[in-house]
Image (cartoon, rainbow, N blue to C red):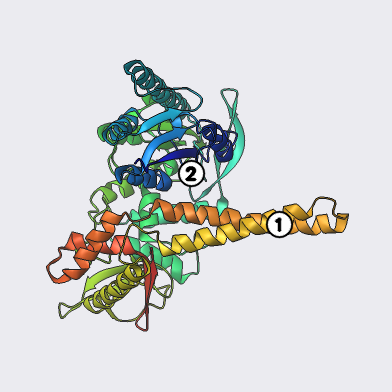
């Protein structure tokens, strides 16, 4: 006896608000059932560029468990727009003898011609996506090389003002007098061989000067000093970038020592921006630079010798690196060795500018042991809630989904009251519906975020195994366990508070 069921899958992308709704897709698909029952799988707010979607992965698991006999979709691109992903799905369907039906395209995967037509259509679906991507990329690089401001806020020291370049409306940077003076001072100070990032950060902190409401951080300062938007670009700046391997869009004669520059990622550049100039694109910008080429180059050459900020390195002295924050100011904690060889956590903000009172004396090994004990306890609670079965839903995600259903039920009740209601009641109901809908949108985003970082059952098994064999677990295994369970930690000498993912 065949106990397998039909499955209907529907997906709607957030970036296509005018696309067919989930509900309409399901109605189309149910027509193929001719009154039969089915299980519905829906993913709202997910792109078709890959198959990393929570309900789609649940469908895959049900197919692998032998529960599904037929999968019905509105169009084949609801599954995926990737040839590789779709080919893998076809292999999965064949392996488990699952029929695939597209309700609007009428594919029959049981015949060679049907399979061939299916493959042709998915090729064109991917071609359409890649063609759109190429047009966007070509337009981006065309605008880059003409000196257009390419979105985003202006760098510190500048504001954005509307302008017209080559008959096209865009924005141009203009110096903010107060902020521009601070930028000039930073460059002048750092050009001194004896002055460090910490010296500059402390100078501004002691005078109560903040930057966009925050104290000046070393990493922020490092990025600012590398940025050629501030340089009054002359031939020396041109020669510097040419020697570093950058592609320069303008002629050498255009570098007159007045304008700043934009530095854009090249098409094939994999490295982090400004870490390696090879194949990046340098373009003269329409705005005026703030810093003389001599001062800017002195700072840039000093930065090239700065090993600490020349690139990002993962800390290897604690598996909590990147997770643990100061419980006072929220800045990341770094691990340092004391005079006796014992390692301590220290607030970066405190180290940079002494503008945080500090989180107290925290021994690395003691904090690691406390966090490990909490991880064991949390894993025990998780296994109790799921009955030891990691396939079950994340309890936090379940709670959010329940809350969402309750809010949607309240909205439905209010909508029902509007028929024939008085003007006063309609006004009240509309205001309440708007308030509930705001909560609803927040919950939908929270559910999407949590689903995106949900830990797979296989991953949970590995984490559990690492926790059980902690003494023999390597550094990367411990980091993996922490990454899977913990969002972040706020610590002081008085308490250690953990924000969990599960």
User: For numbered disc 1, what is the local secondary structure?
Assistant: helix
Q: Which of 420 and 449 is in front in this view?
A: 420
Give above or below for 500 relative to 37.
Answer: below
- For residue 261, side relative to residue 242 (left or right): right
Residue beneath disc 1:
413
Residue drawn at x 57%, y 42% as measured from the top left:
160
Comes first in the chain, label 2 or label 1: 2
How far is the residue under mark 2 from the one under mark 1? 24 Å
Quarter of the rendering occupied by the N terminus? top left
Q: Which residue does the image show at 82% across and 55% down from the upper left?
A: 426
Indicate left or right for 134 with 269 as reference. Answer: right
Work out whether 459 lies above or below 14: below
Q: Residue 382 carries which label?
A: none
Q: In this orientation, which residue lies closer to the viewer: 330 or 400? A: 400
Where residue 18 sits: x, y (%)? 60, 34
Looking at the image, the residue that sits furthest to the bottom is 494
Residue that protrudes farthest toward the left in the picture: 472
Report helix, strand or loop for mark 2. Answer: strand
Label 1 Cα crowd, 10 Å radius (few <14 / some 14-19 / many 20+) = few
Residue 367 figure quarter = bottom left
Q: Which quadrant holds the C terminus?
A: bottom left
Does residue 465 appear left or right of residue 104 in this picture? left
Asked where in the image residue 21 lies, by quadrant, the reply is top right
Q: Which residue is drawn at 33% across and 46% down?
A: 61
Up/down of 493 relative to 404, above or below: below
- The residue at the far front in this view is 1
Within-10-Å neighbours for mark 2: few <14, some 14–19, many 20+: many
Residue nearest the observer in this picture, 383 or 62: 62
Residue at numbered disc 2: 42
Can residue 49 be seen here? The reply is: no
418 to the left or right of 488: right
Locate residue 208, reporting x and y percent.
50, 69
């Amino acid at each position: 006896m065949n106990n397998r069921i039909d499955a209907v899958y529907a997906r709607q992308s957030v970036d296509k608000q005018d696309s067919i709704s989930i509900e309409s897709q399901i109605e189309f698909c149910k027509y193929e059932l001719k009154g039969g029952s089915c299980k519905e799988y829906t993913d709202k707010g997910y792109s078709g560029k890959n198959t990393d979607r929570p309900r789609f992965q649940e469908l895959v698991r049900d197919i692998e468990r032998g529960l599904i006999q037929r999968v019905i979709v509105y169009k084949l691109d609801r599954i995926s727009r990737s040839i590789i992903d779709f080919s893998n799905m076809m292999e999965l369907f064949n392996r488990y003898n699952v029929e695939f039906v597209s309700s609007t395209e009428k594919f029959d995967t049981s015949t060679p011609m049907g399979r061939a037509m299916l493959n042709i259509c998915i090729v064109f679906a991917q071609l359409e996506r890649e063609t759109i991507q190429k047009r966007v990329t070509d337009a981006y690089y065309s605008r880059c090389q003409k000196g257009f401001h390419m979105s985003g806020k202006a760098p510190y020291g500048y504001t954005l003002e509307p302008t017209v370049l080559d008959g096209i409306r865009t924005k141009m940077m203009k110096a903010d007098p107060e902020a521009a003076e601070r930028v000039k001072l930073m460059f002048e100070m750092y050009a001194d061989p004896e002055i460090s990032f910490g010296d500059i950060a402390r100078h501004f902190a002691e005078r109560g000067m903040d930057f966009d409401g925050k104290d000046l951080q070393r990493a922020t300062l490092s990025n600012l000093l590398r940025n050629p938007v501030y340089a009054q670009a002359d031939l020396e700046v041109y020669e510097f970038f040419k020697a570093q391997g950058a592609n320069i869009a303008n002629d050498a004669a255009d570098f007159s020592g007045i304008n700043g520059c934009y530095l854009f990622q090249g098409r094939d550049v994999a490295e982090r921006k400004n870490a390696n100039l090879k194949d990046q694109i340098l373009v003269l910008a329409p705005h005026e630079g703030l810093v003389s080429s001599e001062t800017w180059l002195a700072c840039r050459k000093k930065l090239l010798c700065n090993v600490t900020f020349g690139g990002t390195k993962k800390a290897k002295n604690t598996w909590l690196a990147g997770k643990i924050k100061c419980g006072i100011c929220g800045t990341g904690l770094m691990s340092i060795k004391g005079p006796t060889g014992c390692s301590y956590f220290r607030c970066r903000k405190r180290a940079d500018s002494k503008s945080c009172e500090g989180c107290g004396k925290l021994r690395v090994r003691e904090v690691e042991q406390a966090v490990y004990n909490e991880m064991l306890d949390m894993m025990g609670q998780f296994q109790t809630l799921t009955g030891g079965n990691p396939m079950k839903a994340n309890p936090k995600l379940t709670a959010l989904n329940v809350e969402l259903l309750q809010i949607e039920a309240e909205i439905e009740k209010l909508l029902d009251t509007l028929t024939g209601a008085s003007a006063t009641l309609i006004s009240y109901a509309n205001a309440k519906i708007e308030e509930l809908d705001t909560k609803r949108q927040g919950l939908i985003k929270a559910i999407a975020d949590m689903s995106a970082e949900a830990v797979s059952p296989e991953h949970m098994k590995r984490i559990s195994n690492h926790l059980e064999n902690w003494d023999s677990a390597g550094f990367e295994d411990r980091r993996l366990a922490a990454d899977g369970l913990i969002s972040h930690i706020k610590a002081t000498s008085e308490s250690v508070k953990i924000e969990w993912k599960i």
